[in-house]
Image (cartoon, rainbow, N blue to C red):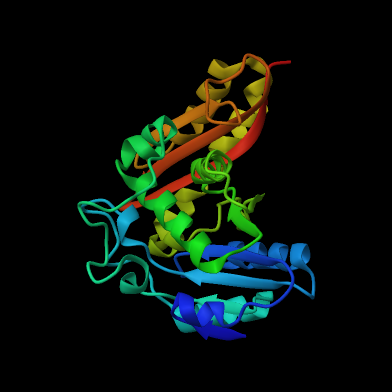
């Protein structure tokens, strides 16, 4: 497996056959490994899988954890290799944004639209402008036929799909189901911030989603009451939102497929999760 740090180096590794890309900010875990394995399954032995490792400064707001975000490139390279990647592309901010290392005042960026103002967008203004712009840039640098993204960041996945469709970008966007710990907690690079006590509390997050799913046949209101009851049993968990939408993040349906989404803070760590639910009888 090759490790490269510039788009020029990456272009030198292009070969016939489909290419899959898995975009990460590093600190890789089993959830990322499953994305790589799914990419390998889809492109086959004749294709290639590229893993990008880039902690993107433009998606972090003031006071967020950009400086302390874990940077573990040697371990990331090892995990990507074991999972079946062909290339790790690890640019720095100069490679991606130029000498200013972030957006200029006159930079051309992606406007993510109104879906970026709800849920995570409401809590993190400007976040999805940074996400979609760097995704578009990395798609241009890696030139894949397939892009694989985890369903844990569900709003991000919906917005990437929307961007690719609206801008007619020549890539298939594949959502891969969330990989979970034994107690149901979604695998996340930020889980390593949790203390032992906080880690035990965090298991309430998937339990709340399970409660929502179990009561969704009784309607949206009943489902959310059940989910909040799980969280209310742990007053130290600060809930940002627990909600149900349609699969495209619109208003919740009266019946049919929907998505339950949650964001909480456990100690100083913000955790998000989601799961599909079916509303109504």
In the foreground, 81 or 240: 81
- Residue 86 image offset from top left, x and y in percent: 64, 79
Counting the numbered discs, the total is 0
Quadrant in which residue 128 is drawn:
top left
Quadrant of the rendering where the C terminus is positioned: top right
- Residue 16 image offset from top left, x and y in percent: 73, 74
Q: Is residue 28 visible?
A: no
Q: Is residue 31 visible?
A: yes
* 253 relative to 107, above or below: above
Q: Residue at x 58, y 54 (%)?
A: 149
Q: Residue at x 51, y 43 (%)?
A: 163
Quadrant in which residue 134 is drawn:
bottom left
Quadrant of the rendering where the N terminus is positioned: bottom right
In the foreground, 72 or 169: 169
In the foreground, 85 or 83: 85
* 162 relative to 189, above or below: above
In this rendering, position of residue 92 left or right of residue 204: left
In the foreground, 146 or 215: 146
- Residue 69 image offset from top left, x and y in percent: 35, 66
In this rendering, position of residue 221 left or right of residue 40: left
Quadrant in which residue 5 is drawn:
bottom left
Q: Residue at x 43, y 77 (%)?
A: 72
């Amino acid at each position: 497996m090759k490790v490269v740090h510039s788009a020029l180096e990456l272009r030198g590794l292009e070969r016939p056959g489909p290419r899959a890309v898995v975009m990460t900010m590093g600190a890789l875990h089993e959830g990322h490994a499953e994305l790589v394995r799914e990419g390998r399954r889809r492109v086959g032995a004749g294709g290639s899988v590229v893993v990008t490792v880039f902690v993107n400064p433009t998606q972090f707001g003031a006071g967020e954890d950009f400086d302390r975000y874990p940077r573990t490139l040697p371990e990331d390279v090892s995990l990507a290799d074991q999972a079946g990647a062909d290339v790790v592309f690890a640019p720095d901010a100069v490679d991606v944004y130029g000498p200013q290392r972030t957006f200029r005042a006159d930079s051309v960026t992606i406007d993510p639209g109104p879906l970026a103002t709800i849920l995570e967008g409401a809590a993190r203004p400007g976040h999805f402008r940074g996400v979609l712009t760097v995704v578009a840039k990395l798609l241009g640098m890696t030139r894949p036929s397939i892009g694989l993204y985890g369903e844990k960041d569900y709003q991000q996945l919906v917005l990437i799909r929307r961007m690719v469709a609206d801008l007619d970008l020549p890539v298939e966007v594949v959502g891969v189901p969330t990989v979970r710990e034994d107690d149901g907690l979604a695998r996340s690079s930020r889980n390593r911030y949790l203390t032992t006590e906080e880690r035990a509390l965090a298991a309430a997050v998937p339990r709340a989603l399970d409660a929502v799913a179990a009561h969704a046949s009784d309607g949206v209101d009943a489902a959310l009451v059940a989910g909040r009851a799980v969280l209310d049993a742990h007053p130290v968990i600060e809930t940002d939102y627990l909600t149900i939408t349609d699969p495209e993040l619109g208003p919740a349906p009266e019946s049919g497929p929907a998505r339950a989404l949650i964001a909480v803070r456990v100690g100083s760590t913000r955790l998000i999760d989601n799961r599909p639910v079916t509303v109504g009888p």
